Amino acid sequence: MDIKQLKHLDALITFGGFTKAAQQLNIAQPALSQSIKRLEDSLGVTLVDRGAHKRSKALSLTAEGRALHQHAKLIIKNMVQAEAHIKSMANLTKGEVRVAVPGMLGSFYLPSRLMAFRHQHPDLKLSLFEGGTRDTLKMLRREDVDIAIITANDLDDNFDSHLLLQEQMVVAVGKHHPLAAQGTVPLDQFFQHDLVLFKQGYFHREWMLEQAKLLGLNASIAFETNLINLIKQVVAQEYGITSVLKMVIEQDDDILAKPFDPPVYLDLHIAWKKQRPISKADRAFVDFLMENR
């Protein structure tokens, strides 16, 4: 049983006989008769009561024929809807982009780009999931999202990716903090001060604690939160210092950005799973970000 045979059965009922149905289907009547016979043979039942048709010249279905016709109508309807849906996705008039991003990018890098993409593709749905770098990586691996922005360290052979941006990691200090007068901040000096950190699952926390370990130092964690604006307020009040991407510190903030000595940069990639081809909507989003870095 295939969709063509179901369409033949539906046409047979709709037009009331083999002759008219064959004309509408643009096939020969014997070909239509053979198609219906093959359908009956494959199911092992009789669908059309040919004896009743000879007596009254009205097409009559058996009980099995009527039952199959109800299913056939639903299948044909669903197929038409599915075909229209896929065509609309291919034409970018329907679809969803599901992307996971680290919090700093979600708040400071993507908003204007998301709005521009939405303006260019108003019929596409955007679903943005923010979290720590570990969260975004997990979501991509579990296929909760189709694409994610992850660090270069998290890339492996399971992913395809493009380098989206390289951003400097800087020390964020209050304007009157002792480090504010310095041009740069060595790592060993950074760890002499109380720190404001993201909670577990964020790359910046992992990186800072790893650097302290490599230097044989202890990191003094004074405050923990995943709320970026709260981190900035705590730093502005000089309860501690932190490290963030340079893009996070804006001109009207009461905090200063000081480069590490030597400078530290973070490579961020937009990635997707190799064995799961991304949709046209996802590809359009990736291409848009790459063109508007």
Image: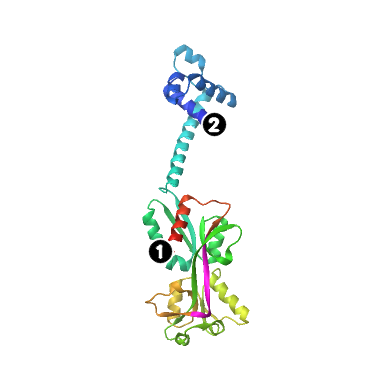
Magenta-drawn segment: 259-270
Res. 153 in view: yes
- Closer to the chain start, of discs 1 and 2, is 2
Query: Mostly what secondary structure, the magenta segment?
Result: strand
Q: Residue at x 61, y 81 (%)?
A: 215
Disc 2 is placed on an element classified as: loop
Q: Residue at x 46, y 81 (%)?
A: 173
The answer to which of 5 and 278 lies nearer the viewer is 278
Disc 1 is placed on an element classified as: helix
- Type of the residue with mark 2: Asp
Indicate the position of residue 13 as horizontal and vertical percent values: 45, 24
Q: Which residue matches tag 2? A: 2
Indicate the position of residue 112 as horizontal and vertical percent values: 39, 63
Sort mark 2 into few (<14), some (14-19) or many (20+) by Cα contacts within 10 Å: few
The answer to which of 107 and 164 lies nearer the viewer is 164
Outermost residue to the front: 291
- Residue 161 on the magenta segment: no
- Type of the residue with mark 1: Pro
Sort mark 1 into few (<14), some (14-19) or many (20+) by Cα contacts within 10 Å: few
Indicate the position of residue 233 as horizontal and vertical percent values: 43, 77
Q: Is residue 177 above or below residue 267?
A: below
Res. 225 in view: no
The answer to which of 279 and 37 lies nearer the viewer is 279
Indicate the position of residue 30 as horizontal and vertical percent values: 51, 19
Q: Residue 111 got which mark?
A: 1
